[in-house]
Amino acid sequence: MTTSTEHETRIDPLWRSWEGAHGGHVAAVALAAVRAQFAGGDQPVRTLTTHFLAPAAAGPLHVSGAVPASGRRTAACVFSGHQDGLPVVVGSALFGSGRPGTSYDGQPAPDVPGPEDRRAVDLPGRLAPFARQLEIRPATADLPLAGGERAELLAWVRFTDGRPLDAGAVVTLTDVLPPALYAVWRSPRPVPSAELTVHFTDAVDESAGDGWSLVRIRTDHAGAGWAVDDSAVWAADGRLLALGRQSRVVRGERP
């Protein structure tokens, strides 16, 4: 096992959520630290798994990692992130170079009107302060806290700072919409991420550009205070960028 030294990075205070920092942002920050210090090099990231042990606060995040396995084409890294000496995240990342192979698209982008034909929606600032860093335009009639019949949201999303759609941005996008249960609820409650796994496609190996992405999130199951959400991120030209799956804790309603 090859062990590396600790690397300090930072959680951006602009990405604050209801309970601590936004999970997708924390995962993206951890990925950047892992790529820079511990594993991967120029190899594209294929999978990132992040377990959220405690809400992350704005400020320094100390990331340590190890490379328990590395081959000619792939490298695996395990990592942990600490704040004030306490663990807040642990996870793993798999990096692998591309090669010739079969192409298949089992998740085509939904046929919906483009972002120019949709109106932006503002998420409540007290619930999702990080949403100020985004422009979100629902692509269907399903809206947060509208008491709909299905736990699914689909929206066009872009970063207000114009950042490119690299792996870190795509990680953030898999978690950027409200929890899908918000589509069937009429009042908000915290639904923090406990674990997030993102699988990247070869479209992220190339330049996915910037601007709009189409993002979908849906709840596959909820019960006993937990929920399982699936998400997908497509580039504006319809290329699938990533698939995400996460476990969430469903908390009770608050005044």
Image (cartoon, grey):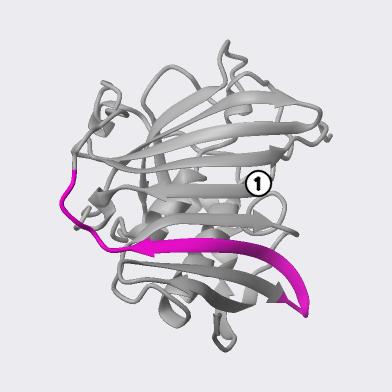
Q: Residue furthest left?
A: 100
Q: Position of residue 201 (x, y in %)?
A: 31, 47
Q: Residue at x 43, y 17 (%)?
A: 141
91, 165: nearer the viewer: 91
- Image quadrant occupied by the N terminus: bottom right
Q: Is-magenta flag for residue 130?
A: no
Residue wearing tag 1: 193
Q: Position of residue 245 (x, y in %)?
A: 53, 40
Q: Residue at x 19, y 40 (%)?
A: 102
- Amino acid marked by disc 1: Ser
| Relative height, residue 101 to residue 228 (above, below) | below
Magenta residue span: 83-101
- Residue 200 visible, this angle: yes
- Left/right placement of residue 198 relative to residue 253 reads left
- Left/right placement of residue 113 relative to residue 155 reads left
Helix, strand or loop for disc 1 = strand
- Residue 22 visible, this angle: no
Q: Residue at x 63, y 32 (%)?
A: 228
Q: Position of residue 207 (x, y in %)?
A: 19, 58
Quadrant of res 72? bottom left
| Relative height, residue 86 to residue 166 (above, below) | below
- Left/right placement of residue 103 relative to residue 50 reads left
Q: Main secondary structure of the magenta part?
A: strand
Quadrant of res 103? top left
